Amino acid sequence: MKKIYSLMIVALMAISIVGCSEAPVAPAKPKKIQDVQVFSSPNADGKITIKSIEAAFDGVGLEIPGNNDMNKPFGLRFKKLHYKIYNLAMFINTDLTFKLIKKYPSFGALTPLTMSIWEGKEGCMNIATLTINAMARSTGIPVDDPDLIAYGELIHKGLALAIPGGTFKDLGHTVKFPNKTLATNFEMELDLDGQSPEDFIEEFEAEFEGEMEPIGFLLPNYTNVQEEIFDDRGYTGVYDFYHTYSICKFDVIYPVSEKHPEAGAWAPCSFYLYKKVGEDKMYLGFLSVDNWITTVGMTEDQEGTKKLREAQKFIENIINEMTE
């Protein structure tokens, strides 16, 4: 399997890593595969649109449950726009997600996956997604897992169809290559005292939403993994519940996106909550903002990193208070 994985990486990286220009010149390949990949192409004729990108992803089996035009709220809230187009979208293949979560519950931290789509003044359309390396490292899944490899291949198919003739480009920042998940995890001991797991999680999530929304956090997507993915495949009696939220904050993504539009490969971040049948414990987790800071080269972006760390601290404080 490792040999197959190596061959796949060679094939994927054989595509030129270039900037977005009419006459690209491919630089030397990076020594390591970056965690975030940006697929780009000139779009002077305007044929590549948000709708055409959605259709392309859907055509290869990547459903898009949410695709948010960030320029609308940015324009109202901050007045100045950084890009002609800037969208944050979520995408998922439910079959592969089922297979991966069944083996590795931590994959909920990437359920759904995310991407940023943007077009600047230069007239190039770009899509940023995570590479298979990032998906494996951040969730602790073996990089040679066949279902993870299949997911990575599917993303590449979607990108190629969405941006015909596009090429991958180096981020051009001083990115780092973490060797651990950089995940933030919590455990909560449960004493339901006759309360059903369904009633418990309904009350818990109502309180969570009530704490998050007043301080500016948005919850653009909610996935009941148990009902929408597990039950449809007859996978019952394992979890009492398994849910994920997508979490975003305008005051965070706006300053970050100015210099690092590709950070949308990590945002909105996914937050999972699950309880297994027969256990008196709930597991919660999300991927730390250190994933953003290290893998897209944000170490010198003081404003962006400050906003990210503040947001994470807010979330951690809320969860810690609720799980005590």
Image: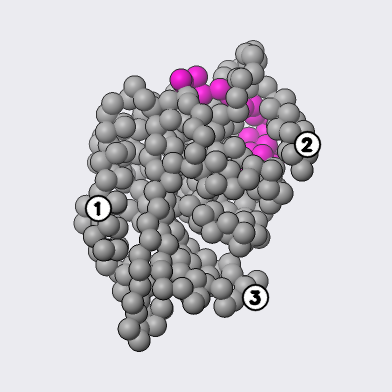
Quadrant in which the N terminus is drawn: top right
Q: Residue 60: give x, y in percent of width and height.
A: 69, 50
Callout 3 secondary element: loop
Task: Identify the residue at the far left of this view.
Answer: 214
Tags 2 and 1 touching, CB below 8 Å:
no
The residue at the point 48 percent across, 26 percent down is: 176
Say how the picture is coloured.
Answer: one colour
The amino acid beneath tag 3 is Gly
Name the one closer to the observer, 38 or 132.
Answer: 132
The residue at the point 39 percent across, 36 percent down is: 290
Magenta residues span 155-174
Count of numbered badges drawn on the protein: 3
Quadrant in which residue 198 is drawn: bottom left
The amino acid beneath tag 2 is Lys
Examine the structure image and report whether residue 309 is included in the region drawn in magenta.
no
Q: Which residue is mark 2?
A: 3
Q: Which residue is mark 1?
A: 317
Report, in whole angstroms, how far the alpha carbon at label 2 lies from the one at label 1: 44 Å
Quadrant in which residue 202 is drawn: bottom left
Q: Which residue is mark 3?
A: 234
Quadrant in which the C terminus is drawn: bottom left
Name the one closer to the observer, 16 or 130.
Answer: 130
